[in-house]
Image (cartoon, rainbow, N blue to C red):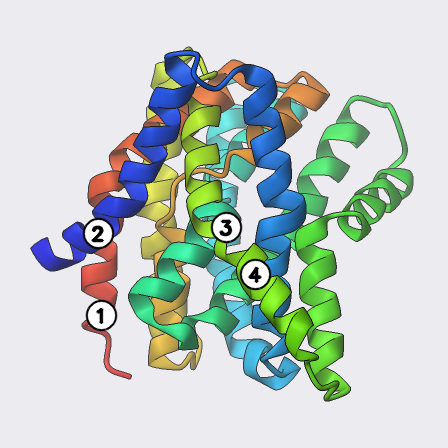
Amino acid sequence: MLEIFLKTLPFFALIALGYGAGRTGFFSKEAIAYLTKFVFYFALSAMLFRFAANLSLGEIFDWAFVGAYLVGSFAVYAVAALVARQRGLTIAEMAFEAHTSIIGNVGFLGVPMLVLLLGEAAIGPVILVLAMDLTVFGSLVVVLVTSSKGSSSPSAALRSALSGLAANPMIVSITIGLIWSGFNIPMWQPLDDFVTILGGAATPGALVAIGASLSTIKARGLVPAFWLSGLKLFVHPIAVAITALWLFPVDGFAASVMIACAALPVAGNIYILAQHYDVAPQKISASILVSTVVSVATVSVVIALVKQIPL
């Protein structure tokens, strides 16, 4: 356990470094925004493209894996949604609370950390979890929120969500990488060197960007934040473990990666989405902050546990 904690500590130390840089004003809000853009549009996209280009669709896609993750995640989603409705929240607030309870920081934190800690074989399962989070659940929250606000019909909301996915650099880079691999296109050495160098900036850049972004967050709405953080850090990985290890025939290693992804703290992009739709941004931001701080301990515990799963 201590060994795993010491391996995860540098990742969270980089987040703390970014937080300090933002909190002290060393990074302005404008600098934080541009750092995040650099990571999102360039460094992380280069890393994902390189990963995907060296995989086949068969190595990534697995119906049992998809079923286990979706069933486990939707179970937690349903719990969060029911509790939200019982508290008298609107459909839009319910959608964001449910979304927050299951969407972890797989892109900025999971991709670099889990691949390093669990090995390069984790690349395929991590990419598949990221793809499901972005396409299935990312589309669902947009459809629910826009439809509930009466700003568009469900079909129009879905078209808007799909167009947003088509413009998402993570989805685009994964898709291009898989097409590259599918057609067995040789990787030109200068191109490989380019994406390797650029992708190398993804890990430190993403982690510092997470911390810097957290420094701009004000922790308000702590009671729901602790509730949502608890769902994300504890209930979500347990639910996914049940479906992956007992309900679906998921390979042991792939199941361990899935569970580790489910244990990651709340994704920072949910706050941006909440701000865009003006739906409880303070509550969402507090959940991101609380879950990230608590995950310093919980992620290490989960990774230590999943390493015990028979392969």
For label 1, the crowd category at 10 Å Cα-Cα, with few meaning under 14, some 14 to 19 and many 20 or more, is some
Which amino acid type is marked by label 2?
Answer: Ser
Q: Residue at x 70, y 57 (%)?
A: 171
Label 1, label 3: how far apart the Cα atoms are: 28 Å
For label 2, the crowd category at 10 Å Cα-Cα, with few meaning under 14, some 14 to 19 and many 20 or more, is many
Label 2, label 1: how far apart the Cα atoms are: 11 Å
Label 4, label 1: how far apart the Cα atoms are: 25 Å
Q: Residue at x 55, y 38 (%)?
A: 99
Q: Reading the chain from its start, which is encountered first: label 4 or label 3? A: 4
Q: Residue at x 76, y 76 (%)?
A: 179
Q: Quadrant of the C terminus?
A: bottom left
* In the displayed structure image, the side of residue 98 where residue 172 appears, left or right: right
Q: Residue at x 35, y 35 (%)?
A: 15
Identify the element where label 1 is drawn. Answer: loop
Q: Looking at the image, do the residues carrying marks 4 and 3 touch, with CB atoms under 8 Å apart?
A: no
* In the displayed structure image, the side of residue 299 where residue 75 appears, left or right: right
Q: Looking at the image, do the residues carrying marks 4 and 2 touch, with CB atoms under 8 Å apart?
A: no
Q: Position of residue 128 (x, y in %)?
A: 56, 66
| For residue 41, above or below residue 177 | above
Which amino acid type is marked by label 4?
Answer: Met
Circle 3 is placed at which residue position? 201
Q: Reading the chain from its start, which is encountered first: label 1 or label 3? A: 3
Q: Position of residue 307 (x, y in %)?
A: 22, 70
Circle 1 is placed at which residue position? 307
Identify the element where label 2 is drawn. Answer: helix
Looking at the image, the residue that sits furthest to the left is 2
Tag of residue 300: 2
